[in-house]
Amino acid sequence: YPVVGSMLSSPIESDTLDGVLAVHVIYHALPEDISQTIAEVYRTLKPSGYFYLTLASHEHGSYGVGEMIGKHTFLPLSGIIHHFTSLRETESLLDRFNLVDRHTSQIDYVTKSEETIRCTHWRILAQKGQ
């Protein structure tokens, strides 16, 4: 059933979800909001529940584009925040989870102005402990 809420504060009860999928979503926020979102996912997952997410890597071709509004965080002309994470930050953000799989993927994105940007993302499968 559909649930309306914020990624920062969900109306979903604690320990109720089998899994959470967050692809190309969470990194469009400030670092403190990313941390809060991951804590909220942890709260709503059942023990042994899975969390699959993507985070933008420092190696992403858009790193540094736009106004720097925080450490590794930029606001491009699109007005959509992008936060880029290192391996260390990624591991720190997910330190309450067991990491099942973590790797990077790359795709080439062609902009409206026909510029090609190499997009590099962390792809992570994490599991809440028992």
Image: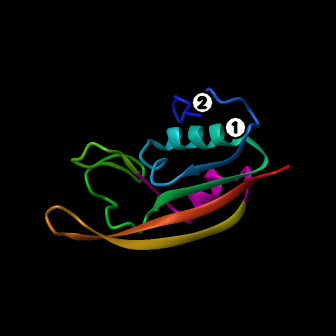
The residue singled out by tag 2 in the image is: 10
Question: Which amino acid type is marked by label 2?
Answer: Ser
Query: Residue drawn 58% across and 29% down?
Result: 9
Image quadrant where residue 126 sits: bottom right
Label drawn at residue 119: none
Q: Farthest residue toward the left?
A: 113
- Of 90 and 78, the residue lying toward us: 78
Q: Against 50, is 59 above or below?
A: below
Image quadrant where residue 119 sits: bottom left
Query: Residue drawn 71% across and 37% down?
Result: 43
Mark 1 and mark 2 residues within 8 Å of each other at the beta carbon? yes
Task: Measuring from the top left, give residue 110's x and y in whole percent.
Answer: 24, 68
| Direction from residue 124 to residue 32 in the image, left or right | left
Disc 1 crowd, CA 10 A, few/some/many (<14, 14-19, 20+): many
Magenta residues, start to end = 83-98
Query: Residue drawn 62% across and 51% down?
Result: 93
Task: Measuring from the top left, give residue 84's x and y in whole percent.
Answer: 44, 57
How far apart, in angstroms, are the residues tagged by discs 1 and 2? 8 Å
Magenta-drawn stretch contains 92 = yes
Which mark is first along the chain, 2 or 1? 2
Task: Measuring from the top left, give residue 12's x and y in whole percent.
Answer: 65, 30
Q: Farthest residue toward the top?
A: 11
